[in-house]
Image (tube, grey):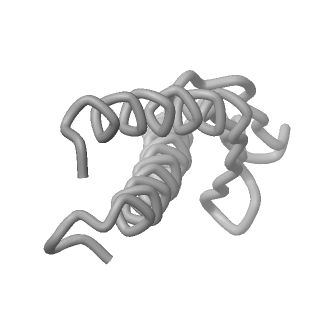
Amino acid sequence: MNIGKMLKQAQQMQAQLQEEMEQLKVEATAGGGMVTARMNGKKQLLTLEIKPEVANPEDLEMLQDLVVAAVNEATRKVEEALSSRMGNLAGMMGLPGMP
């Protein structure tokens, strides 16, 4: 295969991947749904919902932990989606060592 053609194909696939990731939306919860984080494929936090009953001024540490857990889980989901898509693209290109 021609190197120039491979590079052009890789650039097209990268552009496709970037577009897919921009469209991606993930949601993660913590505390049995008490805190919900929504994130896009660029790892930007879009919304953070907190149920009123978990907002206890006497226990802010628990609320903080739930927020951190929800955001971290949303980030993990974005990374998982990116990894999966990159593996699919590499496989389409026939790169060795990739699924």
Q: Would residue 59 be seen by someone viewing this image from the given angle? A: no
In the rendered image of this protein, does residue 56 appear above or below residue 62?
above
Task: Name which residue lies at 64% across and 29% down.
Answer: 19
Quadrant of the rendering where the C terminus is positioned: bottom left
Task: Name which residue lies at 82% across and 43% down.
Answer: 51
Question: In the image, is 57 to the left or to the right of 80?
Answer: right
Q: Would residue 60 be seen by someone viewing this image from the given angle? A: yes
Q: How many marks?
A: 0
Residue 30 image offset from top left, x and y in percent: 61, 58
- Residues 7 and 86: in front is 7
In the rendered image of this protein, does residue 53 appear above or below residue 55?
below
Residue 40 image offset from top left, x and y in percent: 64, 32
Furthest residue in direction front, as rendered: 2
Question: In the image, is 62 to the left or to the right of 83?
Answer: right
Residue 22 image offset from top left, x and y in percent: 64, 27
In the rendered image of this protein, does residue 82 appear above or below residue 38?
below
Q: Which quadrant of the structure image shows residue 21? A: top right
Question: In the image, is 52 to the left or to the right of 16?
Answer: right
- Residues 14 and 78: in front is 14
Furthest residue in direction right, as rendered: 52
Question: In the image, is 97 to the left or to the right of 12?
Answer: left
Task: Name which residue lies at 58% across and 35% down.
Answer: 16
Residue 96 image offset from top left, x and y in percent: 16, 71
Task: Name which residue lies at 73% across and 33% down.
Answer: 23
- Residues 56 and 74: in front is 74
